[in-house]
Image: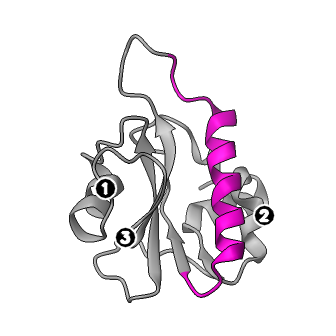
Amino acid sequence: MRVTPKHIVKLDKNEVIVFGANVQGRHGKGAALTARTKFGAIYGQSKGLQGQSYAIVTKELRSNYDPVTLDEVKQGIDNFIIFTKENTHLTFYVVELGCNLAYFTVEEIAPLFKPAMRLKNVYLPQRFIDNLQTGFTI
């Protein structure tokens, strides 16, 4: 299995961290902060490739706006999967995006990555893999 390491502190030249971002692209906490401070994520850019980072929108910070929906997250993941197929020279390490600060669950997010299970250049978190194989998360 291709499993994302628990802590990503270093990436080789052709490796990319895939993280959840807010609509505003602030990258101020969690994996987003790591992506900004270590791997080239751009403050204010909420999606797509940025240095050795790839952002997928999972959260709206403004309380007077509707939250990001699971369908919107799915669209971002679908776009990411297309991108990985077009960039097979890169290796992508997906973190548990959307499952901490954005309040989605592994059971909601993991199934969206099912098409990525067969891609040789995509690594997934162990809990996503467990869920995709069993339908449950331990």
Residue beneath label 3, please? 51
Q: Tell me the SS state at disc 2.
A: helix
Q: Disc 2 designates what residue?
A: 115
* Residue 27 vs residue 118, the one in the foreground: 27
* Residue 113 relative to residue 91: left or right: right
Q: CA distance from mark 1 to mark 3?
A: 8 Å
Question: Measured from the top left, where is residue 104 in percent x and y?
Answer: 54, 37
Residue occupying the point 37% across, 15% down:
63
Name the N-terminal-most of marks 3 and 2: 3
Q: Secondary structure at mark 3?
A: loop
The relative height of residue 118 versus residue 26 in the rendered view (above or below) is below
Label 1: which secondary element: loop
Q: Residue at x 78, y 76 (%)?
A: 118
Q: Nearer the viewer, mark 1 or mark 2?
A: 1
x, y percent for residue 74: 68, 44
Task: Give the residue at mark 1.
Answer: 42
Region in magenta? 66-90
Picture quadrant where residue 124 is located: bottom right
Residue 13, given in percent of the width and then of the height, sits at: 39, 88
The residue carrying pointer 3 sits among few (fewer than 14), some (14 to 19) or many (20 or more) residues within 10 Å by Cα, namely: some
Nearer to the camera, 109 or 17? 17
Q: Label 1 neighbourhood size at 10 Å, few (<14), some (14-19), many (20+)?
A: many
Assign the magenta stretch its main secondary structure: helix
Q: Is residue 77 magenta?
A: yes
